[in-house]
Amino acid sequence: MTMDTHAPLSRPDARADAPARPELLVLSGLSHSYGGVRALHDIDLTIGDNEFFALLGPSGCGKTTLLRSIAGFETPESGTIALDGVDLVSTPAHKRPVNMMFQSYALFPHLSVERNVAYGLEAEGLGKAEVKRRVGEAIETVGLGAFARRRPSQLSGGQRQRVALARAIVKRPRLLLLDEPLSALDRKVRADMQLELKRLQHEVGMTFVVVTHDQEEAMSMADRVAVLDAGRVEQLDTPVGLYSNPRTRFVAEFIGSSSLFDGTATAGGVDVAGLAELPAAHTLPVGSAVTLVVRPEDIEVVAPGGAGLLEGVVIDTYFLGGSSTVSVAVPGREKPVGCTVHATSTARRGDTVGLRIDHARSVVVADTRPVSHGGTESA
């Protein structure tokens, strides 16, 4: 697992690299390539029993390859996939105690809801009474009891997703894999289903592993999240830990919004060329290339002219209901600095303002990019 050699000082939020619950799935040294292109680089992960775990990252980061390897649809070049201590790499997909819910849901259009859900159990040769009982329980669990006789074409997108979930859980797998399960839903239905998935996972007492590129989806549902980039695990943590204590520049940029100040580590902070030396606590070597990560809620908009302040000109404000986002152009930076202000901001476009950074909440990470640094990056 790829980590910074020198981690930033932690905030009070607890990290969770290892599950507090008993381990269920252990991936060790997992690597895979496609035509000479490395998709997975020596992946090590441990997933706990009854855990909701997310694999998060941009397109092409390797998360779907990892999920398909666990399911048995891909055979990794090296490494082990142990479920309850038993290596599954040589076990075919249909013999693994694992079920997978595909992005397309893959429902049979000519079958009713209850027949779709019953299909896997009937294929196993279970008795009619047992199939009926388990199908009824699964359909009620996902809230579709009144729709049991309908066909997929008579259901909404959210209802079809529930049918796919019922079909996945009715076989009672030890592990349920979900590949971008909410991507086909509109924003409101997606938000409702995020809560529904979490409720369902608790209710059935099953381990869920979900693949997604949507950070809001991962952060709202998962107990822990593995952030992947270029086939490597950049960071494994709780949602709060990822946001509060990013350990690489990629994670800081990918998770949430932040202003990134690239510069050189000093004994008391980060020297940002063309701007200032910004104070921050860290343990990185003096003189090394680093990035100071500042979240928008940790920057206060104040009157200009005070000591220790950055100054800039307001270029826009966005009212978001309970808060406003103020965008400030700071001389020496290519991109504006974003600040979150509670309720309505009094700052107006064209105003010169001061920016006070809460240095106690800033995080410093190593900047491993093979480029020169000018303090101009912001995300």
Image: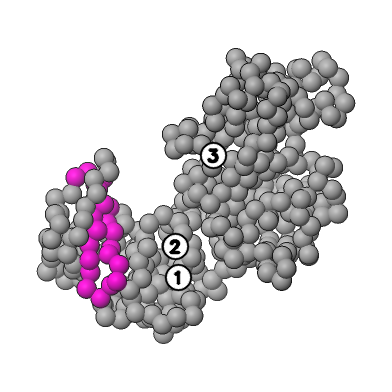
Seen in the image, is 102 located left or right of residue 155?
right
Judging depth in this view, the residue of 155 and 77 nearest the camera is 155
- Over which residues does the magenta segment extend? 323-344
Q: Residue at x 85, y 30 (%)?
A: 124
| Amino acid type indicated by mark 1 | Val
Q: Residue at x 75, y 24 (%)?
A: 118
Q: Helix, strand or loop at disc 3?
A: loop
Q: Helix, strand or loop at disc 1?
A: strand
| Amino acid type indicated by mark 3 | Ala
Q: Earlier in the sequence, mark 2 or mark 3?
A: 3
Q: Is residue 333 magenta?
A: yes
Q: Helix, strand or loop at disc 2?
A: helix
Q: Which residue is mark 3?
A: 184
Which picture quadrant has residue 172? Answer: top right
**CB atoms at circles 1 and 2 under 8 Å apart?**
yes
Q: Residue at x 76, y 17 (%)?
A: 132
| Other residues around mark 3 within 10 Å, as few (<14) / some (14–19) / many (≥20) | some
Q: Which residue is mark 1?
A: 365
Mark 1 or mark 3, which is nearer to you?
3
Measured as percent of width and height from the top left, residue 277 is found at 29, 77
Measured as percent of width and height from the top left, residue 300 is found at 23, 58
Mark 2 or mark 3, which is nearer to you?
3
Q: Earlier in the sequence, mark 1 or mark 3?
A: 3
